[in-house]
Amino acid sequence: MSKHTLETKLKAVDFYINKQYSYKETAELHGANTSDVIQWVALFKKHGKEGLQSTYTKYSAEFKMDVLTYIEKTGASIREA
């Protein structure tokens, strides 16, 4: 899960794009790394707000065990599973 909220990411992107702060200045103002801001701006330009939303998914232990059982029985790779 990201340590930065969607709101923080959007504010940082706004500072960079609309208020014309540098990547470094924007990062310092929002408690982020310069590389984070660079990535957020690129994602925003390519995908809009949706590009900044977290894609982290929490799977249950039962689901994980089902996947491991499937891999063991079928010989499937992790990617295939």
Image (tube, rainbow, N blue to C red):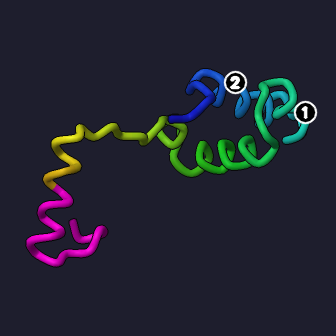
Residue 11 marker = 2
x, y (%) of residue 9? 64, 30
- Relative side of 81 to 11, left or right: left
- Relative side of 40 to 16, left or right: left
Three-letter code for the amino acid on which mark 1 is drawn: Glu
Q: Residue, x 71% and y 43% (percent of image)?
A: 36
> Which residue is denoted by mark 1 in the rendering?
25
The vertical placement of 30 against 59, above or below, is: above
Which is more toward the observer, 10 or 64? 64
Determine the secondary structure under disc 1: helix
x, y (%) of residue 16? 80, 35
The vertical placement of 72 against 60, above or below, is: below
The vertical placement of 81 against 1, above or below, is: below
Residues packed near mark 2 inside 10 Å, few (<14), some (14 to 19) or many (20 plus): some
Q: Residue, x 9% and y 71% (percent of image)?
A: 73
Q: Do the residues labelled 2 and 1 touch (CB within 8 Å)?
A: no
The vertical placement of 53 against 63, above or below, is: above
- Relative side of 79 to 32, left or right: left
Residues packed near mark 1 inside 10 Å, few (<14), some (14 to 19) or many (20 plus): some
- Relative side of 81 to 58, left or right: left
Please identify the residue farthest to the left as the structure is shown: 73
What range of the chain is rendered magenta? 67-81
Q: Residue, x 16% and y 42% (percent of image)?
A: 62
Q: Residue, x 18% and y 45% (percent of image)?
A: 63
